[in-house]
Amino acid sequence: MNTITLLESGPWLTPTMSVSDDQTNTDPAAAGIAVVRPDRVPNVPLRGGPNGAYFNVAAFAVPPSGAGRVGNASVGSLEAPGTIAVAAGLAKVIPIHGNFNLRFESTFTNVLNHTNFAPPQTDISNPNSFGVLTTGQTAESAGNRTGQAALRLEF
């Protein structure tokens, strides 16, 4: 019997907003910049947004009009969901006769069938999708539970 267990914290994400809401008075769109940072609203929790969203859109706001500055939300201030993946295998060698053995093997990924979500959207300009977990993760065997079984005759 064998197992490989992966317990991993989520990636750090940066809240963003549309460049059309920019208040730096520097025209970042002309430099090819597509998103800028919003302001962080104090005393509002980052987690637990409306409609079951992972992040709370109310924790961020567009900087005041004519602020002449970048939003104060820090880079990497949001932690996306982590990963829990357990893979397991089982093997048994059954002696048949002399040098003949039958080997049974079975391996499974994501044995617990735990749903691991991909990082959510972080653009506050789209409040309906901000922080919403919509896509399952497929990397690092963290997707759906899969299994395989094999028989092998060894001689």
Image (cartoon, helix red, strand yellow):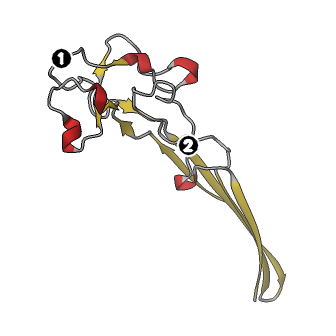
Position above or below: 92 against 126: below
Instruction: Identify the image quadrant of the N terminus.
Output: bottom right
Q: Seen in the image, is 71 located left or right of residue 4?
A: left
Secondary element type, mark 2: strand
Q: Is residue 134 left or right of residue 39?
A: right
Question: Along the line of sight, which residue is nearer the eye, 21 or 70?
Answer: 21
In this view, the residue farthest toward the top is 43
Q: Which residue is denoted by mark 1 in the rendering? A: 66
Q: With respect to residue 50, does 115 lie above or below?
A: below
Quadrant of residue 32 within the rendered picture: top left
Q: Amino acid at mark 1?
A: Gly
Closer-to-camera residue (14/61): 61
Mark 1 to mark 2 CA distance (whole Å): 45 Å
Numbered circle sitting on residue 84: 2
Question: SS of the residue at dot 1?
Answer: loop
**Of callouts 1 and 2, which one flags the residue occurring earlier in the amino acid sequence?**
1
User: Residue most toward the right?
Assistant: 96
- Asked if the residue at tag 2 contacts the one at tag 1, i.e. Cβ–Cβ closer than 8 Å, the answer is no
**Which quadrant is the C terminus positioned in?**
bottom right
Dot 2 alpha-carbon crowd within 10 angstroms: few under 14, some 14 to 19, many 20 or more = some
Compared across the picture, whether 132 is left or right of 64 comes to right
Percent position of residue 77, x then y: 33, 29
Please name the amino acid that badge 2 sits on: Ile
